[in-house]
Image: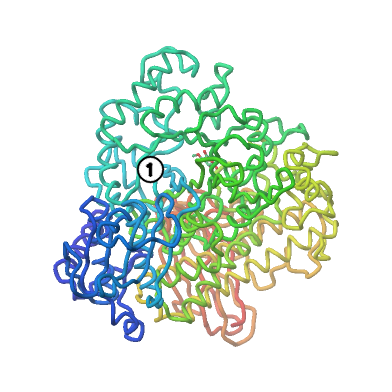
Amino acid sequence: MKRSSFLRVVFLAGFLTLLCPSQQLRADNGYEGWLRYAPLKEKEREKFGAFPSTLVVGNDSPLLQASQKELIRGLRGMLGRDLTIEKELPKENAVVLGTLADLRSLAPELHPPVELRTDGYWLTSRRIHGQECIIVAGATDRGTLYGVFALLRKIALAEDLSHLQEAQAPANPVRWVNDWDNLDGRIERGYGGRSMFFENGSVRADLSRANDYARLLASVSVNGCIVNNVNANPRVLATDFLPQLARIADAFRPWGLRLGISVDLSSTKSLGGLDTFDPLDPRVQSWWKEKANEIYRVIPDFAGFLVKADSEGRPGPSSYGRTPADAANTIARALQPHGGIVMYRAFVYDHHLDWRNPKNDRARAAYDIFHPLDGNFDDNVIVQIKHGPIDFQVREPASPLFGGLERTNEAIELQITQEYMGQQRHLCFLVPMWKETLDFDMRVDGGATPVKNIVSGQVFHRALGGFAGVANAGLDANWMGNPMAMANLYGFARLAWDANLSSANIAEEWTRLTFGNDLAVVRAISTMLLSSWPTYENYTGPLGAGTLTDILGSHYGPGVASSENNGWGQWHRADHEGIGMDRTVATGTGFVGQYSPAVQKEFETFPATPDTLLLFFHHVPYAYRLKSGKTVIQHIYDSHYEGAERVSQFVQMWESIRGLVGDDERYAFVLAKLKYQEGHAIVWRDAVCNWFLRVSGIPDTKGRVGNYPNRTEAESMRLQGYVPVDVEPPENASGGKAVACQPATGECAATFHFSGTLGTYQVNVQYFDQNNGKARFRVLAGGRLLDEWVADDSLPNSKLGGDTSTRRKIGRVTLQHGDEIRIEGIPDGGEVAALDYVEINPN
Ligand code: GCW
């Protein structure tokens, strides 16, 4: 279905639901995310038999109106109940909704058990004038809205409300998402379709999607959204563009979500007509002041600016010999009178580093640049720090900068969009990874100073700080390209509210809200989620070496050597003797010295360093023995086999809950993704293992690597029309080669004879699904058609290689000795119906 017609269907469905609330019209394509409000089971519903039927709302602000509508919508969906709205306290049980100030005028005797901080809420059940009431009271209107979502969450989780008493407030004042949307409608590192904000250089006419996004974000208490790419287009500040942005802010406002934008620091030149963007030039300073005034005239609750500067080619203060503090303060002073803030990214580094110099280290950059500026930033500036010192790799230590800014506001930047983590095609629940960083104790001045308490402002007594998450949700029906990826958006926001929540808790909560309370479902999905990151790590990058992905291209498939011999600084330094970056003070880049003395002790020596981060901090020979007792090289082999094997179990776990997850559409979608991941994990496994086998020359003690007895290479089959081609790098195809059907040929075939004995087998066809055509494949055995399909996925490459190599699994095939196996390929466009191998495994 085309997107536009699809959206029409979604909105029509929504409209019909409003018209006939009793009818359970469900569009379970993932659009509702964790806000499904699906009818509770009879038994669960009984718990809410005494739930009031009347609603009293304290004031009529837009946020309270949204709160009221949401409560009605949720109760209707889950309990099939409607609420009658009253102005005064009625003579019957009621839900009372409002700010603490509203509550005081209704029932002055009621006080929350603790003082509610900004955005906090209080849920309780109390008698007011003899009537049983459920009270939802917020410190502010926004807090009340969060309270409503919290109450609805409790109902969805079928919690007992009879002794309701909960007062909560967010640990972090800043809980923002960053969306890297370009004004032309593309999203940088977005895997959920095109932008919901922009198209063709303008803000979209229809912003209903942005409104729904704001609702989703508000339900988990996100309070700010940067709507455009950090690689910012100066046009976003143009006078005629601001009213367009104001329309997005309008769509966000009922949900308490404030709009902010990324800005290009050279806007004074490219847009403002000045001949400079020197932050200390008075003309530059007054340009920013006037621009801020102009913004606040159309967006009175504008949140602030996000800045990427002196980074990956973005202009910045270094052009004028100025510091990030100079630049941040200039624009912060423009925003300050209006209450706006500047999020200045610490992701500042030189991507033309000389890789031949063993002392060079990109990981050092943020601390080297920002630590000396501590105390120089204005109070409405927050330094936004990626969680690790490199760039969202599968395993990084906490950035030492968190411990290096005692007199500066900080925020942690987490990447929700799975750029390096399988791009939403692979299941990878990132909450456990984020928690490792949040819980990491920087031991500043010897005390307990975990990252979570630093960014919240608690440790260094900062008034501002918090979380920024790169979300990149798009127009896809399910927002992120995969319903399972929504667990990361949910988890990010829950941690921003309370970083002490456990991964298990968040996984279970999300699963119940998204797929229902069936215990088998909750168990299976939570298990999958919680083991998915270590699994992904296992088949991609080992022991802190970083993701071994193609860092020069898609950041998706394997590309082990791509990080070496270039200036990007994502080096793992693997050669024929060993692997890892020596970052020690004694012999390496000195990066370890950026941590507090207590933390330095954890990383400076081999024996102290945990296995998981060994190669991040040290260069070791392949025969080095880990704490696990394995050698490094055997660990690389074993972990890759274990990881790939584990994904097969995910497929089985998912299949075990068929029929229990509420609807077939999401079930089938996720199953297809998991099956794809199962095949791609093998591509990863083989590429990484073969690369290390070739480079180290040390065989796998278990004899698996380089040894594939059940495979027949396509290049060794009898080829009609197909021609063998080299694949680069060679480890990304079995035997380094594939066969391609050159377009002129029209149709090709590759055949061989089965050499095993009579039995049932599983036939795996490894082919390449390029994104520049829709080739077709047919597989026949002994003249019988086994399977046929169209290679129409949109993987991130048009070439044959690790991004496009895909497995088709054909289960339970009866074969006998001598059967002819024939694969036919019909190319399309630039796609050459390429094949890598066929593997026939006993069932
Ligand atoms: O990891 C890199 C990404 C870039 C991104 C950059 C950043 C927006 O590959 O796409 O640019 O990080 O975080 O600024």
Q: Give residue 83's position: percent from left, percent from top.
A: 20, 70
Q: Quadrant of residue 89?
A: bottom left
Residue 732 can be seen, yes or no: yes
Q: Residue at x 51, y 34 (%)?
A: 344
Marker count (numbered):
1
Judge whether 554 appears above or below 18 on screen: above
Between 27 and 425, the one lying in front of the other is 27
- Look at label 1 and name its amino acid: Arg
Q: Residue at x 67, y 36 (%)?
A: 362
Q: Give residue 538's position: percent from left, percent from top.
A: 66, 62
Between 578 and 76, the one lying in front of the other is 76
Q: Residue at x 56, y 64 (%)?
A: 502
Between 193 and 70, the one lying in front of the other is 70
**Mark 1, residues whose alpha carbon is within 10 Å: few (<14), some, or many (≥20)?**
some
Q: In the rendered image, which quarter contains the N terminus?
A: bottom left
Element at label 1: loop
Q: Residue at x 35, y 43 (%)?
A: 258
Judge whether 321 appears above or below 206 on screen: above
Residue 679 can be seen, yes or no: no
Is residue 634 toward the left or the right of residue 366 in the image?
right
Residue under pointer 1: 186
Q: Give residue 259's position: percent from left, percent from top.
A: 35, 41
Query: How are the colours assigned in the image?
Result: rainbow
Between 144 and 234, the one lying in front of the other is 144
Is residue 31 toward the left or the right of residue 624 in the image?
left
